[in-house]
Image: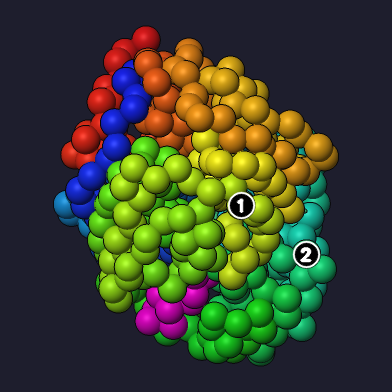
Amino acid sequence: MYKLIIHGGKPLHGSVKAAGSKNSSLPILFASILADAPITLNNTPQLSDISTTLRLLMSMGADFILESNSSLFVDSSKLNNLVADYNLVKTMRASILALGPMLTKYGKAKVSLPGGCAIGTRPVNLHLKALKELGASIKVENGYIYAKSDGLVGANIHFDQITVTATENIIMAATLAKDTTTISNAAQEPEISDLCHCLNKMGAKISGINTSNIIVKGVSKLNGVEYSVCSDRIEAATYLVAAAITGGSITVKNTNPKVIHSVLEKLIEIGADIKTGNQSIILNMKDKRPKAVSIKTGAYPNFPTDMQAQFTALSTIADGYSSITENIFENRFMHVPELIRMGANLTLENNTVVCKGVKSLTGAHLMATDLRASASLVLAGLAAKGTTIIDRAYHLDRGYETIEEKLKLLGADIERVQD
Ligand code: EPZ
């Protein structure tokens, strides 16, 4: 185990390049199960969730070669073990994305129930309901999902609740199903569009991309592909908040401003000066104190839940009262008590944090609990007076590629030390 030690109070300046998207790489890696030949994935981020996914695919009989730091050659075309084992699934909930591809390609799958995590119970009932509507028979016992089918058949699927990975699971299952599947109230996150573009390049017939009504016409097989994943909009937005909370200025490259429009709107509202190019964003918050804002998270294109913890950190030093409402997950406030230990004035009322901004935070010894909560603590530490120590910092490696190196290049005084 290791921890991060941050000496705060230094404005960040400079430029940083966003890595490939975690939440696009993961479904596309599972989509490799659908292909009759290997895939080559470029612009993949170096994250522990990617390594976990590769280990899981290997446990099912896949092979991979790391061609460079960000290029993966993955052959999942002939699996010999249609089981996603608990010991790997428990470390990464997105492993549920193995279910749809295995079921539609091989007619059966055994996938461990992912279980909950720090931010919520994370049920998968919507995944299973939709797969049943495609003709699968599903049994859940001893902590595993047992799915089988004599060949999935297209159906009209409606999601009562917007769900990202269930939308992805059904799109992937539908690609090799008979006939056509329509999905209404589909999630519209950019990572889903990236998955669809990759699947179409593999020979799938998906239309309605970028909308809440997706149509998938089943095909008999999918080919190998070479594909570059989109950049990570949440990583990019996190660095913008790092500059805003420290009163600095930053250029984030390799980022499409359109996919974080809702975040940029809020950064402008807090008083940041924002300039955008077609693949870059410049934020200038030189020596300004953020203004208080109100945030409500929602499904894309609304304000992303994955940026809620980071904006809660930012609001702790804003001028005035902020309110941050979390509408997606029932327990995504693990960062709140830790921020209070740094001197933040936060009150939790149901799914809303009310924050009375303070002039500055003070460093403290903290514990990370989940990926985005950990990012929130890093941001608070960068802004705080004095030293902040963050234990269990391995949570960060799930979603932020070499975070302390990138922050050091921006002028942060941060180091990673063994526990
Ligand atoms: C995806 O998780 C992302 N993960 C999450 O990012 C992200 O926070 C989330 O979407 C929301 O945008 C990946 O893409 C790998 P959901 P997912 O299904 O698909 C409920 C990060 O930090 N629900 O959209 O698991 C669920 O409990 C991670 O990068 C059911 O009730 O989220 C939640 O309240 C964290 N039943 C809501 O729907 C189901 O079967 C939305 O969840 C499925 C979901």
Q: Residue at x 39, y 69 (%)?
A: 257
Q: Nearer the viewer, residue 384 or 182?
A: 384
Q: Nearer the viewer, residue 352 or 20?
A: 352
Residue 199: x, y in percent?
A: 45, 76
Q: State whether label 2 is within 8 Å of ligand 1.
A: yes
Q: Amino acid at mark 2?
A: Gln
Q: Which mark is residue 50?
A: none
Q: Amino acid at mark 1?
A: Val
Q: How many residues crowd around disc 2 within 10 Å: few (fewer than 14), some, or many (20 or more)?
A: few
Residue identifier under label 1 = 293
Residue 158: x, y in percent?
A: 78, 76
- State the extent of the magenta-drawn residues as a range: 190-202
Quarter of the image holding residue 281?
bottom left
Is residue 258 rendered magenta in the image? no
Q: Residue at x 30, y 15 (%)?
A: 417
Mark 1 → mark 2, Cα distance in angstroms? 27 Å
Disc number lying in front (1 or 2): 1
Q: Nearer the viewer, residue 167 or 272?
A: 272
Q: Residue at x 77, y 60 (%)?
A: 126
Is residue 194 rendered magenta in the image? yes
Residue 358: x, y in percent?
A: 56, 30
Residue identifier under label 2 = 161
Earlier in the chain: of badge 1 and badge 2, it is 2
- Per the image, label 1 sits on a secondary structure element best described as loop
Looking at the image, do the residues carrying marks 1 and 2 touch, with CB atoms under 8 Å apart?
no
| Residue 48 visible in the snapshot | no
254 to 313, vertically: above or below: below
